[in-house]
């Protein structure tokens, strides 16, 4: 039998090894691109979430300052994005009709909101403003309000209607998804800020909260943030 001997320079290439090597190089390049996209979107999403908290706190402080200049005292909960107005400013106990002095407060608040939300700094940044009615745990039952649920809802509705009647442009404000910004809800006594076992605590629980929710990152970016946070929480 005749033997064929190849010199080193004549050894035929291993096409299988070359194909696998090219494939692995291609996969590595794709992985690097995907990882870069992932990191970029995660950084952008977390930056927007942080900026939203900063913007909301700035918005609340600005509104509070403008109201203080007008002689109106409100409290602010920056952590939860709430501008809080006590019952006594707007309503008589057990009533849902806005008092004349309360109407003036709501009118001024509406003026400030209309100007601030349309300013360059905040336009498109707010997703929803919830006008929330809250009561204490003392039951109410009469012809107008069978329970505190009806009272809290009606107070929220009347607050919004009073605000919108003097500032109709508020009902046309849209978020960045072309949805109306304002919403109303009533929680009765289910979300107290103080224990209801004292007169002072019940008084603080009877209130209107104006809750600001900022526009979040896109759903895709938020899914990335959620995934990363879940991985960190399992470590």
Image (cartoon, grey):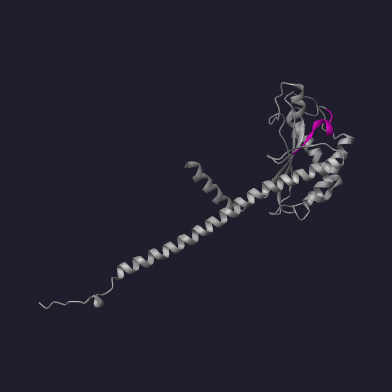
Foreground of the two, 102 or 63: 63
Range drawn in magenta = 83-92
- Quadrant housing residue 205: top right
Give above or below for 33 relative to 215.
below
Residue 100 locus on image (x, y percent)? 89, 35
- Image point (42%, 65%), residue name: 26
Give above or below for 128 relative to 5.
above
Foreground of the two, 222 or 153: 222
- Image point (50%, 44%), residue name: 232
Residue at the far right: name it: 100
Give above or below for 213 relative to 3.
above
Foreground of the two, 174 or 77: 77
Q: Does residue 85 show up magenta in the picture?
A: yes
Residue at the far front: name it: 8
Residue 202 locus on image (x, y percent)? 75, 25
Q: Is residue 140 visible?
A: no
Q: Does residue 150 show up magenta in the picture?
A: no
Q: Is residue 222 visible?
A: yes
Residue 132 locus on image (x, y percent)? 74, 37
- Image point (84%, 33%), residue name: 89
Relative side of 12 to 69, left or right: left
Residue 42 locus on image (x, y percent)? 56, 53
Relative side of 158 to 219, left or right: right
Relative side of 100 to 11, left or right: right
Residue at the far left: name it: 1
Give above or below for 12 relative to 55.
below
Relative side of 181 to 7, left or right: right
Q: Quadrant of the N terminus?
A: bottom left
């Amino acid at each position: 039998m005749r033997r064929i001997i190849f010199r080193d320079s004549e050894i035929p290439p291993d096409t299988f090894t070359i194909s696998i090597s090219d494939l692995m190089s291609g996969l590595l390049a794709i992985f690097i691109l995907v990882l870069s996209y992932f990191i970029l979107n995660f950084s952008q999403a977390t930056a927007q979430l942080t900026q939203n908290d900063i913007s909301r706190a700035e918005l609340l402080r600005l509104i509070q300052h403008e109201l203080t200049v007008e002689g109106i005292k409100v409290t602010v909960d920056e952590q939860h994005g709430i501008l809080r107005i006590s019952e006594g400013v707007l309503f008589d106990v057990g009533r849902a009709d806005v008092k004349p002095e309360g109407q003036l407060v709501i009118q001024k608040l509406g003026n400030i909101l209309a100007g601030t939300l349309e300013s360059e700094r905040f336009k498109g940044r707010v997703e929803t403003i919830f006008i929330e009615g809250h009561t204490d745990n003392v039951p109410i039952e009469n012809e107008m309000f069978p329970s505190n649920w009806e009272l809290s809802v009606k107070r929220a509705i009347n607050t919004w209607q009073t605000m919108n009647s003097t500032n109709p442009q508020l009902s046309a404000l849209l978020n960045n998804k072309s949805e109306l910004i304002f919403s109303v809800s009533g929680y009765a006594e289910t979300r107290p800020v103080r224990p209801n076992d004292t007169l002072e605590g019940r008084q603080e629980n009877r209130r209107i909260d104006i809750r600001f929710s900022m526009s979040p990152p896109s759903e895709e970016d938020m899914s990335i943030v959620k995934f990363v946070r879940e991985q960190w929480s399992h470590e």
